[in-house]
Amino acid sequence: MLCPIQSQDTASKQKNLFQSGSAQTSYPPAVPLSAAMATFNTASTPNPNPNKSVEVVQPPSDSVSSLTFSPNANFLVATSWDNQWGGGDGERSDGGGDDCGGNGVAVVWLWWLSCGDDSNDNMMAEVRCWEIMRNGATVGSVPKASMSHDLPVLCSTWKDDGTTVFSGGCDKQVKMWPLLSGGQPMTVAMHDAPISEIAWIPEMNLLVSGSWDKTLRYWDLRQSNPVHTQQLPDRCYAFAVRHPLMVVAIADRNIIVFNLQNPQQFLNDQSLQ
């Protein structure tokens, strides 16, 4: 096959064309990188507070474990994992400083939860109460009171008359706090492991508590011992009560339903696996 032979003038013109750049594709001028990033960030930044939420005054300094409103007033109670150091120097414990490899606080929490050691009486975790108020479109909060547990607090509930708060946690105790009367907290229930959930059952005039010790315990506040202890297949993580039913979530992804009119018997054992 014969190829056409370009003349010297044609080849020279093509060479000059590419050298001059007149045959190259034309592009818009480059945008500086900083300007492009600024435009990108502006377009992608969401509204950080779309619901116009308001933070309570003097909030907990660590993760909040439970929130519960009074059934009769705008009082909010929160429990948390925060702690205060009650020692003479007033400083927070980091659980060993450099020996913990920079993770002292995490090591302390893990030690508390795994060992349940109550020997350190200088550590306190707080239960806080605020009054929530609204003035037109403005919502505010006023700290009203607080009380302490020896270890992180995991759960809370109100008595149905709105006068008393119950709280429980890693110190294996349920404390009753006569909040509105200004009374001192007192221990009304005990378990052998951290207490993960509590509820007041007004239809039975009983307090029920669930624990990692694999039990539910029902308490008449006039007695020091539980009126009934229900053994569970595994650790209790949470429950909800709507009398006469109580639904309990336990470890290994299981849910158990009880009829509180006969709490010794399971209605259902449903696995979520």
Image (cartoon, rainbow, N blue to C red):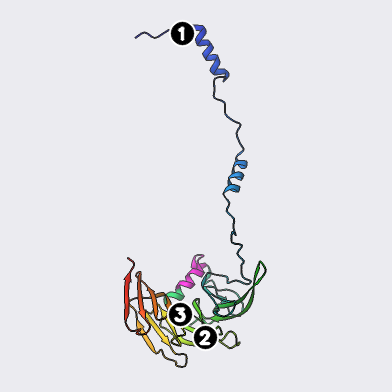
Secondary structure under badge 3? strand
In the displayed structure, 30 sits above or below 63; it is above
Amino acid type of the residue that numbered disc 3 sits on in the rendered structure: Ile
Tag 3–tag 1 contact (CB < 8 Å): no
Image spot of residue 222 (x, y percent): 47, 93
In this orientation, does residue 99 appear? no
- Find residue 139 and name its label: none
- Based on the picture, tell me whether residue 124 belongs to the magenta stretch: no
The mark nearer the N terminus, 2 or 1, is: 1
Which residue, given by chain and number where applicable, does mark 3 sit on?
Answer: 198
Secondary structure under badge 2? strand
Q: Main secondary structure of the magenta part?
A: helix
Left or right: 103 in relation to 191: right
In the displayed structure, 144 sits above or below 137; it is below
The mark nearer the N terminus, 3 or 1, is: 1
Amino acid type of the residue that numbered disc 2 sits on in the rendered structure: Met
Nearer to me, 270 or 198: 270
Front label number (2 vs 1): 2
User: Which residue is most to the right?
Assistant: 135
Q: Classify 10 Å Cα crowding around label 1: few (below 14), some (14-19), many (20 and above).
A: few
Front label number (3 vs 1): 3
Image spot of residue 51 (x, y percent): 59, 61
Q: Which residues are magenta?
A: 98-110
Q: CA distance from mark 2 to mark 3?
A: 11 Å
Which residue, given by chain and number where applicable, does mark 2 sit on?
Answer: 176
- Find residue 6 and name its label: 1
